[in-house]
Amino acid sequence: MRTRTTFRAAALVLLLFPTLYAAAVRLLLRRNLSRLRTGDLGPMVALFAPDVHFTFPGESSWAIDVRDREAVERWEQRFLDTGLALEPREILISGPPWSTRIALHFDDHLTTDEGERVYENRGVIFAVAAWGKVTEFIVYEDTQKLGPLDEYLADREPTPA
């Protein structure tokens, strides 16, 4: 009888583990995205493996394809310095800790200090993580909208002396 109870408890844990793991990852991402919105890059950058493959396709000034956590940190710092805001809509998690797949559906925008919305976009981030470190990170959004954003930012960036 005790063996049967132990087996059932183990089976229940194994059945619940994927759901609990996904919930924990989702909670961690929501917390880190919230910190990112307040200007704190640290928790998000800490998730990236040193050789993370980060891709943002397109022809804009935002386009990047690197395998370097420091380059990703500089890209994300520019995102914050520009005033862009990313709002998560849905986070999907699948897979075990050694091969976790993450899909983040988001809206991003730039609003001026006067309240004018000068940029809006929607996209999906697809990421792969292994043992708590993101090894691949790809951003998919409407890259056509980035041209006007680049023009807007170029008009406002100080010119070098």
Image (cartoon, rainbow, N blue to C red):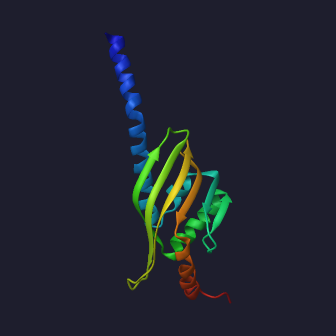
Query: Looking at the picture, does residue 153 appear above or below residue 60?
Result: below
Q: Position of residue 52 (x, y in %)?
A: 63, 53
Q: Position of residue 36 (x, y in %)?
A: 47, 63
The image quadrant of residue 35 is bottom left
Total number of numbered discs in the rendering: 0
Residue in the picture at 32% in, 16% down: 5
Apparent side of residue 57 relative to residue 12 in the rendered image (left or right): right
Q: Position of residue 109 (x, y in %)?
A: 44, 73
Residue in the picture at 61% in, 74% down: 60
Query: Looking at the picture, does residue 6 appear above or below residue 109?
Result: above
Which quadrant of the figure contains the C terminus? bottom right
Which quadrant of the figure contains the N terminus? top left
Closer-to-camera residue (67/55): 55
Residue in the picture at 39% in, 39% down: 19
Apparent side of residue 125 relative to residue 65 in the rendered image (left or right): left
Closer-to-camera residue (115/63): 63
Q: Position of residue 75 (x, y in %)?
A: 59, 67
Query: Looking at the picture, does residue 101 appear above or below residue 159?
Result: above
